[in-house]
Image (cartoon, coloured by chain):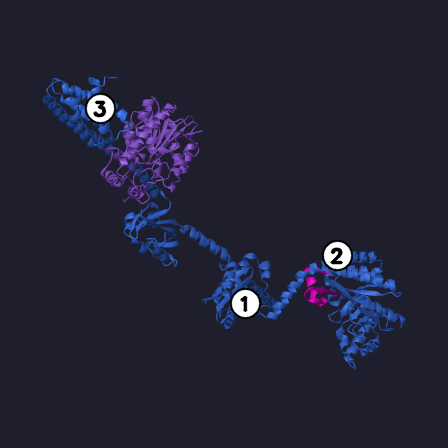
Amino acid sequence: MSAEPDGPEGRVRRLTTIWSRAVYPVTSTSLTRAEFEELLLPLAHRLSRALRARSFDAGEARAVGAALVEAHGTDPEVLARTLDCVDAYLVLYCGDDSPQDQLRMRSSRLQHAMAAGYAQALRERTRAEQECIAQAALRAQGVVAEALHASEARFRAVFEGAAIGIGIADLDGNVLQVNGALQRMFGVSETTMRGRKVRDWTHPEDAPQTWRLYEELVRGERDHYHVEKAFHRTDGTALWTNLTVSLLRDADGAPQYQLALMEDTTERRLLHLRLRYEATHDALTGLPNRTLFFERLEKALAAGEGQRFGLCYLDLDGFKAINDSLGHAAGDRLLVEVADRLQSCTTAPGEMVARLGGDEFVALTTGRDTERGVEELAERITHALLTPVGIDGRDLLVRGSLGIVEGPAGERTAAEVLRSADITMYRAKSAGGNRAELADPEADARAITRHGLTTALPSALERGEFFIEYQPLVHLGDGTVSGAEALVRWLHPQHGVLGPDRFIPLAEHTGLIVPLGRWVLEESIRQARAWREKTAGPLRINVNLSPCQLTHPGLVQDTVDILERAGVTPDALCLEVTESALIGADDGLLKPLRRLAEMGVDIALDDFGTGYSNLANLRRLPVSVLKLDRSFTQGMQQYPADPVDLKIVEGVVSLAHSLDLAVTVEGVETSAQADQLRLLGCDTAQGWYYARPGPPEQLHTLALADATS
Amino acid sequence: MERPAWAPRSIDISVPSVSRMYDYYLGGSHNFEVDREAARKAMEFLPGLPKIMQANRAFLRRAVRFAAEQGIDQYLDVGSGIPTFGNVHEIAQAARPGARVVYVDHDPVAVAHSEAVLAGNEDAGVVAADLRKPREILTSPEVARLIDLDRPVALLLVAVLHFLEDADEPHRAVAELRAALAPGSLLILTHASYEGIPLPEERAEGAVDVYRDIRNPLVMRPRDEIARFFDGFELLDPGLVHLPNWRPESAREDEDDFAFSGFAGVGRTA
């Protein structure tokens, strides 16, 4: 707006500039001062007009005052400076030619009205803003309260609807609130629960740390703990729970409440107990089973110094026969009765009886004096089995073999102890049964070695750990070597050279005797051929045949094959069969021997005179040689010889020769023996007097020496 | 039943609020005695606080007008506080009718008041959210309704970043917001600093202590740290300067000495 500087417009502008300069610094407007001045200009005009108006118009002045508030001049200093400015310059710049005092009077009245207008506007604005912010605060609180309400409702629903029991108590243990699940678990109402104190909920089955953890929590030293805990229900039953207790702190971290979350594990626990019982007890007799027995035995063996254990291992004799003849139901009833009787034998603390399986039972006693205790226990068991068991109207005698082991804790493992008991029980059994035996470390060791050898046999054959020694057979007539007996040896990696008595019975037992026997036959025949190639005379090889091999269907074919492969005639072979193996032999058993004999293989009857041979039977056997047992020749070692032995040998030789059988004697150790036997008419002899069993070369040398002499 | 310890805490108007204190500095009555008491205490140490706030408002006005001149018609004002006068939507909609504005604040009273003020204004909205969680701002329904993030936006962080402590990772928050902005967007920022206050720092610290006591710590940052908020933005002329020096429209003699406290700047995304 352009104006003459000294014209009315210019003068109002000057007033406005002065006014804005005075007031601008005390306003809080975001306008620039120039913009603010433009805001004031119309106000200045209004004041200017009001000054000169014919009649005084308070409304105009009030409006100008209010406009200052509107322009964010809310600081009262704005009014003070405005009034200063109006008082000093309004009449000066905007007055007309009216009398000065009249103009000044009008200016004063305008100022009064402006002040009133400003104050009223400021009061209105302040009230409005205060109202406005108070409303905003209320609404904001409403929003939060609503959110809080929703959140509380949600938590309430979680609390009430939770399947887990929830309880809140203060730190003195007063129960403040519990949810429905917890009430149902305890079977009481919330009111009853609220009257309770946490401390009242002790239970005899509480773990030792349960209440220590609780105290630590309420003292604020622990934020939570987890235990398995039982509670008394009002109906007298126990409620088992998985209990987690947490400490709730206030905003400043001070402990405030305790929160208990509990899960009802009663059913699960019962199931667990039942499963545990089933897993550790024998279903038939209700006795503890092998699992539980081993747990107890291990515990007994882990007991401290001075603690001992005693164990009776019982196996019923002839139980299989009862099962087979009377049926399994009867067998089971017998086992139940035996279990009951055994149970009545173990009444003292530290004693238990268990069924290991089948007809095997075990009784355990523990403590400091089990040396005496286990003997008494064995006596009680033996005594308890004396009375016959009545089943299906019959009285069954119960016989059992007992193996007893006793010793200090901490030396052996449970498996070692049980093995010792087992071995000992078998000793009782092989001694005839129905008796008790005490464990003996040496007997155990033997049994263990035997077991070890048995298991090592098959791989020993594969690894070539067997070898053969030969003992010469000497013709008594001219002292020439007529043949040799093949004797198998085992070069065991740990035990050294083992004789056949150590392993042949084991091989018989496991059936390994068949491949082993075949190997011995092959090896011996191979050796026989080697000898035959080197010397002119026919050398014969004697090979032992075990009872097991005798019944093996491949015997004849195997022997033929071996002879043919080696290109050796059957007359180079003599098979030795023990007298005992042929006692009571029927035609079926003799048939393969007969076949072999027909082919030209000699059959010798070994260990003759030890069994109770039916002499008449000798005629029936396809035998061409009798080997007299060494027991007959022992009496001839000294001089003069035992006359009875002489008579017997003489008789046997005479009998043999009358049946066309040659006689070989074993165990010849002195020249006196040799002379005597020659006089008695024996055909061939073997023994240390001639040579001990040795490598094939030894025999070769012997034969050559013999040939050249 | 007592209020459970896990329930949210209610609004406590017995605790001073920085937005209501700001209103008080500007001569408003949108405040309670607790706010006024705290503000008066701060003013004992820094009597020029009202002038600083006024300069801050004046800068806001100039910057929004500048943004409008640049063609920007969407505004996201984070930390908007209590709307008093010269609000962004008034300035922006005066310059460009139909300009859209979203105010964001985490003070529930400020949000409730803003809602009342903006009632009936279809082109403006309020979001209750916290600058510390930019994702909540960007995914809010009001932002979705009013702001097209595919077009340039003016992001206003006026007198708000100094209420975020370093542990709140304010630079990360700004970077996260920037990542959501279309090219050509503007960052309009002011921040408190000891630099420029016409008083010894020890004295100004008294005011900072007041804010710490009301659990709304005021973090005074040096200029270079404030400049880092513009990482990823092109800082526009005249750069990061004291409030009245940003594209001034008034003569120097019209400015109070306190108006030169703190820094202001505008940047643009590439």
Residue located beneath label 1 in the image: A411
Q: Where is A264 relative to A64, above or below? A: below
Query: Magenta span covers which residues?
Result: A488-514
Please rate how many residues cluster around mark 1, counting C-alpha atoms within 10 Å: few if below 14, some from 14 to 19, many from 20: few
Question: Could you tell me which chain the residue with mark 1 belongs to?
Answer: A
Quote the CA–CA distance across marks 3 and 2. 142 Å
| Quadrant location, the C terminus of chain A | bottom right
- The purple-coloured chain is labelled B
Q: Residue furthest front?
A: A6
| In magenta segment, residue A464 | no
**Badge 2 element:** loop
Question: Could you tell me which chain the residue with mark 3 belongs to?
Answer: A
Identify the mark nearer the N-term, 1 or 2. 1
What residue do we see at 87% from left, 73% from top? A478
**Residue B219 at x, y = what percent?**
34, 40
Identify the mark nearer the N-term, 3 or 2. 3
**Residue A506 at x, y = what percent?**
68, 63
- The blue-coloured chain is labelled A
**Badge 1 element:** loop
Seen in the image, is B114 located left or right of residue B232?
left
Residue located beneath label 2 in the image: A553
Q: Which residue type carries mark 3?
A: Thr
Please rate how many residues cluster around mark 2, counting C-alpha atoms within 10 Å: few if below 14, some from 14 to 19, many from 20: few
**Residue A205 at x, y = what percent?**
38, 58
Seen in the image, is A47 located left or right of residue B106?
left
Residue located beneath label 3 in the image: A16
- Labels 1 and 3 within one chain: yes
Q: Which residue type carries mark 1?
A: Glu
